[in-house]
């Protein structure tokens, strides 16, 4: 069955469902889990009227985001340990969340991706996009989606 499952999380209640499902499935089939949190880079504005931010502040903010992401995947790792599942905690830095998920799944030789979807429709989907939809349509690795 599955040997290595990538579980993508953003810390939301909805992604917590994906974490629970991924860990339960891993425990059931004896798979290991790669817990992934993708952290964006700090946006830099080059448009007129944009406030320039000092690079020291940018580095500090990005460090805070990275630390929070590491704490999140470490929490998943602890959850997995409690269920008898080996979990590797991974933080990726990228503005392209879906591409980072696919890349991490390939890099860690995962044979299943588990993630949540907000199920946005219409104008919300057009404006906010769908990282899950992008992973579904661009990954050659099977994807289990929870709503």
Image (spheres, grey):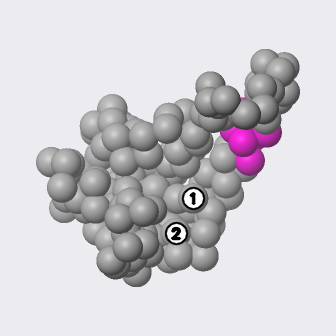
> Looking at the picture, how far across and down is residue 63, in whole percent?
76, 32
Asked if residue 33 can be seen in this view, the reply is no
Residue 59, numbered label? none
**Residue occupying the point 34% across, 40% down:** 99
Query: Mark 2 — residue?
Result: 15
Q: Residue 90 occupies which quadrant of the picture?
A: top right
> Looking at the picture, how far across and down is residue 86, in whole percent?
50, 52
Specify the quadrant that holds the C terminus. Answer: bottom left
Q: What residue span does the magenta drawing correspond to? A: 62-68
Q: Is residue 7 above or below residue 66?
A: below
**Residue occupying the point 32% across, 57% down:** 113
Residue 10, numbered label? 1
The residue nearer to you, when weighing 80 against 144, is 144
**Residue occupying the point 50% across, 51% down:** 35
> Looking at the picture, how far across and down is residue 140, in whole percent?
15, 48
Asked if disc 1 and disc 2 are in contact, CB closer than 8 Å, the reply is yes
Gap between marks 1 and 2 measured at Cα: 6 Å
Asked if residue 66 can be seen in this view, the reply is yes
The residue nearer to you, when weighing 138 against 77, is 138
Specify the quadrant that holds the N terminus. Answer: bottom left
- Left or right of 24? Residue 46 is right
Secondary structure of residue under mark 1: loop
- Left or right of 101? Residue 106 is left
Q: Is residue 126 above or below residue 60?
A: below
Q: Residue 61 occupies which quadrant of the picture?
A: top right
Secondary structure of residue under mark 2: helix
Question: Mark 2, residues whose alpha carbon is within 10 Å: few (<14), some, or many (≥20)?
Answer: many
Question: Mark 1, residues whose alpha carbon is within 10 Å: few (<14), some, or many (≥20)?
Answer: some
Whether 1 is among the magenta residues is no
Q: Is residue 92 above or below residue 18?
A: above
- Disc with the residue nearer the chain's start (1 vs 2): 1
Residue found farthest to the left: 140
């Amino acid at each position: 069955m599955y040997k290595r499952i990538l579980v993508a999380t953003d810390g939301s209640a909805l992604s917590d469902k994906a974490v629970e499902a991924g860990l339960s499935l891993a425990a059931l089939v004896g798979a290991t889990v790669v817990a992934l949190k993708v952290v964006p880079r700090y946006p830099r504005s080059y448009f007129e009227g944009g406030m320039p931010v000092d690079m020291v502040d940018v580095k500090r903010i990005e460090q805070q985001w990275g630390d929070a992401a590491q704490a999140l995947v470490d929490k998943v790792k602890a959850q997995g340990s409690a269920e008898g599942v080996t979990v590797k905690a991974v933080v990726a830095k990228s503005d392209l969340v879906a591409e980072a998920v696919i890349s991490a799944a390939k890099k860690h030789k995962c044979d299943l991706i588990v993630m949540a979807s907000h199920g946005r429709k219409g104008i919300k989907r057009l404006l906010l996009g769908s990282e899950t939809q992008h992973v579904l349509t661009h990954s050659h690795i099977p994807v289990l989606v929870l709503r």
